[in-house]
Amino acid sequence: MLIPIHEEMTREALGSHFSPRALEIIIAANRKQDTLSGQIGHDEFHFDNNAIEKGNRYINEQRGFVLASLLSPGVLSAWIAFGRLTHTAQDFYSHTNYVSLWLDQHSGMAPASRPIEIDPVQKNLLQSSSLHSGKIYFPLDVLYFIPFLKKLSLKFLPDDSHGKMNLDSPKQGPRFEYARVAAVKRTQYEFELLKKILPPEMYVKFVDL
């Protein structure tokens, strides 16, 4: 998703759980994943190019870094690792077809018209053989990000391209809100998961309240 949307979602999901200074560091680490150095050669940061397994492994690694960092005297590294984790978890819903798979199973049913109903960790969808993410096709997917060339690039991009699959902003249509809601819920889920596994003293250190 676009950087301002990542920040907005992270504040919404975590704003009441962390101190202001912790939240700002988490957000800064989240945003940094979308800098040029985080875009080139790091499909696992964004679940691009069908890097589903690599993306999941990256999330697990960052969760492990949070735990390891909290065993040291400082806490900064834990917040940075959690910020990286949240970015990748959020991108899962805007860069894969998870939302489409969820909507397909509710075709014609009430939940399909209510983004708030989406389950971000539905096991059968997470393990579905139909789950895939957008591929980056050079140079067309680069041209997609140039406003006056966007329409032209879309005419030639395959259906499985990032340009055609992404739900990075409201401009992508009504499915974006499902991706956004799922991303916020997943961010909250990741926080609650750490809350469950952290000893009380480490949890207090982590949230910095």
Image (cartoon, rainbow, N blue to C red):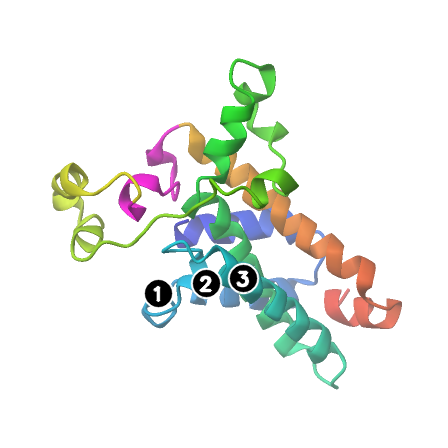
Where does the image place residue 74, in percent across and percent down from the top left? 70, 83
Location of mark 3 (residue): 27
**At numbered mark 1, what does the secondary structure look like: helix, strand or loop?**
helix
Q: Circle 2 — which element?
A: helix
Region of the chain picked out in magenta, as a range:
161-173
If the image is split into quadrants, where does the C terminus sit? bottom right
Query: Label 2 vs label 3: CA separation?
Result: 15 Å
Residue at horizontal 31 percent and vertical 43 percent from the top: 160
Which of marks 3 and 2 precedes in the sequence? Answer: 3
- The mark found on residue 45 in the picture is 2
Q: Is residue 25 above or below residue 162?
A: below
Q: Say if mark 2 contacts mark 3, CB within 8 Å.
A: no
Contact between marks 1 and 2 (CB within 8 A): the answer is: yes
Lower sequence index among marks 1 and 3:
3
Q: Nearer the viewer, residue 103 or 5?
A: 103
Looking at the image, is 152 positioned above or below residue 35? above
Name the element at disc 3.
helix
Where residue 5 appears, x then y in whole percent?
45, 48
Q: Earlier in the sequence, mark 1 or mark 2?
A: 1
User: Which label sits on residue 39?
Assistant: 1
Identity, as a three-letter code, of the amino acid under mark 3: Ile
- Quick one: label 3, few (<14), some, or many (20+) residues within 10 Å? many
Specify few, some or many for label 1: CA neighbours under 10 Å numbering under 14, 14-19, or 20 or more: some
Is 148 located above or below residue 104 in the figure? below
Of tags 1 and 3, the one toward the viewer is 1
